[in-house]
Image: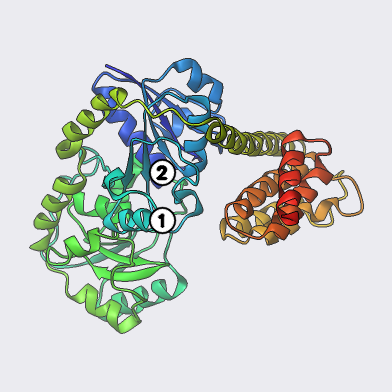
Amino acid sequence: MARLLLATNHLFGWTGSEITIATLGAVLHEAGHEVLVYAPFWSRPDAGQALVGGLPATQKLADAVAFKPEAAYTQHHPVAVAVRAALPNCPIVHGVLGVLPYLERAPRLPLGIHLMLAISEETRDALIASGCPAAQVDVFRNLVDDRLFTPGEDPLPTRLQTVVCYSYKLEAADLQALQAACAAQGLKLRTDTNTQPGNTPYVDAPRRVRAGEVVVASGRGAIEAMLSGRTPLVLANCGDDGLVTPANFSTLMRTNFSGRSRGGKLGAPQVAEQIASYRAEDVGKLRQLALQHFGVTARRQPLLDLFASLPAHKPKVLSKAQRAAIAFEAEGMELQRQFATQAAQLQQRARATAGGTPTDTGDPMPWPEQLKLGSAAWKAGETWKALDLFVAASRGHPASPPMRSLASWVLVELAERERRGGSTDRRRAALEAFLRINPGQAWAEAQLAECLGSELT
C-alpha cells in the first residue's frame, strides 16, 4: 500500500471538487492506502473533518512534504504548481473537472505531470486544444458513490407527480418555466430541496434527490439523480439539455450533463414538453448506465490499478529555469493562502465580539455589506470590482486588518492572472497596489521588476 497525497485548492462546502476528493479518498483509504488531503483554503476550522469524511487533512504544504507521499493526485492548476514546487520527484496525476472555471485551466508551466484526468470528452478536447499532448490526457469521469445514492425502499408512483429542484445553478427564468409547466400539468414542484452550494451535509443529499420523480439538476447532481432511480432534467445557467433519456445519455455525458450539449436555453413551453416526455420505464436503464460509467462499485478496481502503478512513474528532471519559475509561482499561491487565512481569522474574531461587526475602523459601508458585495463580485469573476469594494474602506485612512488581507489576496490573484496572458498595465497596477498595502514584500517587488523590464524590451 502507498502513501498518497490528494491536493485541491479549497475545502469550502459540499460541492463538486470537495466531494470528488472525499469520494476518491474514501476508495483509496478503504483499499488500505494511507491518504492525506492538502487544501490551502478552508472555509471553517473543521473543514478537514466535516468536508472530506474525516480523512487526515491539512492547510500546510509543509505537512504534505513531511507525509512523504509516493504519488499525488491534484486538482486546480495553482495547487499542482505548489505540489510540484514542494515535491519535485513525486509522480502526479492531475484532475480537471470542467472547462469554464479559472482554476480548471491546464497548468501553464511544465510540471512533469504523468497524466491529465479530464472529467468528460468536452474537457479532454479543451485540454488538447490548449496544448496538452493527446497521449497525456485521459477521460476520468465523475466518481459518485452508488452505495450512498440508491433508489431507496419506496417504489416510484406509476405516474409523474413531483418535480424536485436540486441545483444551485438555476436561473430565475428556469424556475419560472418550471413553475408554469408544473402548474399546467398538475404536478408538485419542490424547491425546498434546493440549496446554495455547501449548505447541506452531503449525507443528506440522497433524501433530497428522492423527494420526486424528475430531478432538476446538472453535472454531478444529474448523475446522483440517476443512481437514485430518478430522471434528471438538466437546466443550468450555461444552457439547458432537457430530460436525460437512455437515447441521449451518451451525448449528454460528453459534456458531463452540464447543459452545454444542446446549446442555449429552453423556454417555458419547451420545459413543459420535456417534463411531459418523462417515462417511468427509463429509470432502470438510466441507473444501469450511471452505475457503469460513474459508480464507485464498477470503477473501483481501475481506479486502484491507476494509483498502484503511479509511484513507478517518476517525473523527468526539470531544468533549473523551470524549477525557478515553478517556485516563483508557488510563492504567489502561498501568499494568497496566508492573506486569506488572516482575513478569515480576523472575521471570526470580529463576529465573536459584541455585535459581530468591527465598528472602530471607519469603514464607509457596514462591514457585512462590504464583504457581501465584494465576495459576490469576486465569485462572479468581476475581480477588479471586488478589489474596489475590498479596498474602499481604506481610502483616506488606514485599512482595517481584514480589509488589508482580503485586498492582498485579490491583488496577488490579479497579478498572477494578468501575468498568464493578460495586460501588462493591469498586472503592474495590481502589484503597485499590493506594495502600497504591503511595502517591501520581496515577491511582489521581484514581480514588479520583471513586469517593468518586459515593458522596456
Q: Which residue is found at the position 27% from the left and 28% from the top?
A: 307
Closer to the camera in the image, 209 or 233: 233
**Is 188 placed above or below 151 here?**
below
Q: Position of residue 398 (x, y in %)?
A: 89, 45
Q: Which quadrant would residue 314 be assigned to in this image?
A: top left
Closer to the camera in the image, 151 or 34: 34
Q: Which residue is outermost to the right? A: 396
Position of residue 181 in the picture relative to residue 417 (left or right): left
Q: Which residue is found at the position 33% from the left and 61% from the top?
A: 258
Q: Disc 2 and disc 1: Cα gap in Å?
A: 22 Å
**Is 438 placed above or below 58 here?**
below
State the mark number for residue 17: 2
Asked whether the viewer can see residue 389, the reply is no
Q: Amino acid at mark 2?
A: Ser
Position of residue 434 in the picture relative to residue 162 (left or right): right
Q: Which residue is found at the position 73% from the left and 47% from the top?
A: 407
Closer to the camera in the image, 242 or 259: 259
Image quadrant containing the N terminus? top left
Q: Position of residue 365 (x, y in %)?
A: 80, 57
Q: Which quadrant would residue 147 be assigned to in this image?
A: top left
Sequence-first disc among 2 and 1: 2
Q: Which residue is mark 1?
A: 130
